[in-house]
């Protein structure tokens, strides 16, 4: 076991990370710095400070940072410029939060002179990869402690016994069996895994969902939203300019009200297993639909198709933890360049789980030319006879192949 002088722990204040904090102190006899990130998970974070103090953590070694604006502005919005979806459905709400947490953890390590960082991700999941790839990309010589890969506290019963023995406060919900799900929340989504959901043949319980009503219980009247975009990013909602995190929070509220953004997915984890998760991403679902709508009138056809070709690769890069890699940065540069003309507004209708685009326009960058696209008399703007040669040239290779098959009796 290598010597550890000071470690920065990603600390939520919950049972798992509280056990980890005490375990680090006992096992490594090291000074611990706690870092708690506010990513909009909707929980009171100040109790994490009080719990850290109870463990003897110095006040100057307790960091509770509001990262909501940085999260949406510098991570969520850049990802949505690419219309990013993993495996056809997943909006990557957990994946996109990890590089920011890793970044701030390393900043705190440098600030406090720590030589080590630690996280509470298990050895079965993707997050261990995402955190640690971020650590090494930003601080190549840092030491990493992943307790779930070292200790023998591999069951809930062992964690509770360790907590009881060491005087770690155990909330009533843990004593009574805890939540039936493993959950992760931030401003983009809330996820549910484990227990009842480990049977992919079992429908998720309606009582599980926290952010959205069921489509059946959504209002009978549709609601219209106007979203304004500048350089591919949402800048205003219904004419009101807000900060990035405020816009996403508002979309979450409105989308949840109308039953938008639920997903039940069996995904392919980076570590090789299939895993079922349920997700609520109401604001993200609205944002994705609206962004594609404004791109439909402002992006060149081949640029739009190129973006679609690259999106799956970009999604895998983020899912697999390579946010800080040179390939993600190179792709981001290309994607951001395409967004310079993605300016305008989109009107969507929210109704019982659906986001329906009903109008879109750009005063400065629209490529839609009604004088050419019209089904009425275009006054010579488009010569329909031009299609003759185009079609014959594109059919030439297929005509040659068909003639060859005929000659050879195939």
Image (cartoon, helix red, strand yellow):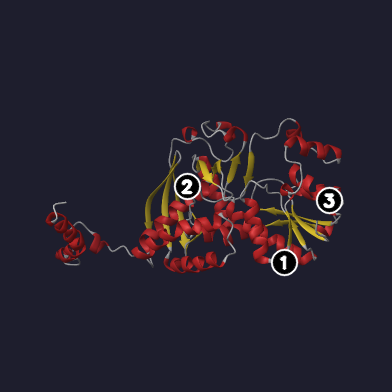
Q: In the rendered structure, which disc, 3 or 2, sits on the residue that comes first in sequence? A: 3
Which residue: 59% across, 43% down?
191
Camera-near label (3 vs 2) is: 3
* Residue 156 percent coordinates (x, y): 73, 36
Mark 1 neighbour class, 10 Å CA radius: few under 14, some 14 to 19, many 20 or more: few
Q: In the rendered structure, which disc, 3 or 1, sits on the residue that comes first in sequence? A: 3
Residue at the spot of label 2? 89
Choose top left, top right, bottom left or bottom right for residue 324. Answer: bottom right
Residue at the spot of label 1? 141
Q: Residue furthest front?
A: 408
User: As drawn, is 48 to the left or to the right of 42?
Assistant: right
- Assign the N terminus to one quadrant of the image: bottom right
User: As drawn, is 253 to the left or to the right of 183?
Assistant: left
**Badges 3 and 2: C-beta atoms under 8 Å apart?**
no
Q: Residue furthest left?
A: 407
Query: Which numbered dot is residue 366?
Result: none
Mark 3 neighbour class, 10 Å CA radius: few under 14, some 14 to 19, many 20 or more: few
**Badges 2 and 1: C-beta atoms under 8 Å apart?**
no
* Residue 199 percent coordinates (x, y): 56, 33
Residue 72 seen anywhere in this rendered image of the structure: yes
Q: Is residue 213 above or below residue 393?
A: above
Q: In the rendered structure, which disc, 2 or 1, sits on the residue that comes first in sequence? A: 2
CA–CA distance in space, label 2 to label 1: 37 Å
Q: Is residue 60 above or below residue 93?
A: below
* Residue 254 percent coordinates (x, y): 52, 45
CA–CA distance in space, label 3 to label 1: 22 Å
SS at badge 3? helix
* Residue 316 percent coordinates (x, y): 51, 55
Residue at the spot of label 3? 27
Residue 241 seen anywhere in this rendered image of the structure: no
Q: Name the one closer to the observer, 132 or 34.
A: 132
Camera-near label (2 vs 1) is: 1
């Amino acid at each position: 076991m290598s010597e550890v002088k000071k470690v920065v722990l990603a600390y939520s204040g919950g049972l798992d990370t509280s056990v980890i904090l005490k375990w680090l102190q006992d096992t490594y006899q090291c000074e611990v710095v706690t870092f708690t990130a506010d990513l909009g998970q909707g929980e009171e974070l100040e109790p994490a400070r009080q719990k850290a103090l109870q463990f003897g953590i110095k006040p100057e070694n307790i960091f509770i940072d509001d990262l909501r604006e940085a999260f949406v502005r510098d991570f969520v919005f850049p990802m949505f410029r690419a219309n990013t979806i993993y495996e056809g459905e997943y909006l990557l709400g957990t994946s996109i939060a990890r590089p920011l947490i890793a970044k701030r953890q390393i900043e705190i390590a440098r600030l406090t002179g720590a030589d080590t960082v630690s996280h509470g991700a298990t050895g079965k999941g993707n997050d261990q990869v995402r955190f640690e790839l971020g650590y090494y990309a930003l601080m190549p010589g840092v030491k990493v402690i992943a307790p779930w890969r070292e200790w023998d506290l591999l069951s809930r019963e062992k964690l509770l016994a360790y907590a009881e023995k060491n005087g770690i406060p155990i909330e009533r919900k843990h004593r009574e069996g805890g939540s039936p799900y493993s959950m992760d929340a931030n401003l983009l989504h809330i996820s549910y895994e484990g227990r009842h959901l480990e049977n992919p043949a079992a429908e998720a319980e309606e009582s599980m969902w926290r952010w959205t009503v069921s489509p059946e219980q959504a209002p009978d009247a549709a609601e219209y939203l106007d979203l304004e975009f500048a350089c591919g990013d949402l800048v205003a909602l219904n004419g009101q300019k807000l900060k990035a995190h405020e816009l996403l929070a508002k979309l979450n509220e409105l989308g949840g009200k109308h039953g938008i953004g639920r997903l039940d997915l069996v995904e392919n984890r980076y570590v090789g297993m299939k895993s079922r998760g349920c997700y609520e991403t109401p604001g993200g679902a609205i944002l994705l639909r609206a962004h594609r709508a404004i791109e439909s009138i402002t992006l060149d056809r081949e640029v739009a198709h190129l973006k679609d070709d690259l999106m799956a690769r970009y999604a895998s890069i983020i899912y697999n933890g390579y946010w800080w890699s040179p390939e993600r940065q190179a792709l981001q540069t290309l994607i951001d360049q395409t967004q310079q003309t993605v300016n305008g507004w989109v009107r969507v209708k929210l109704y019982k789980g659906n986001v329906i685009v009903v109008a879109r326009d750009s005063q400065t960058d629209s490529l839609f030319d009604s004088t050419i696209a019209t089904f009425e008399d275009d006054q010579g703007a488009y010569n329909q006879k031009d299609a003759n040669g185009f079609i014959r040239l594109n059919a030439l290779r297929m005509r040659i192949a068909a003639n060859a098959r005929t000659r050879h009796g195939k």
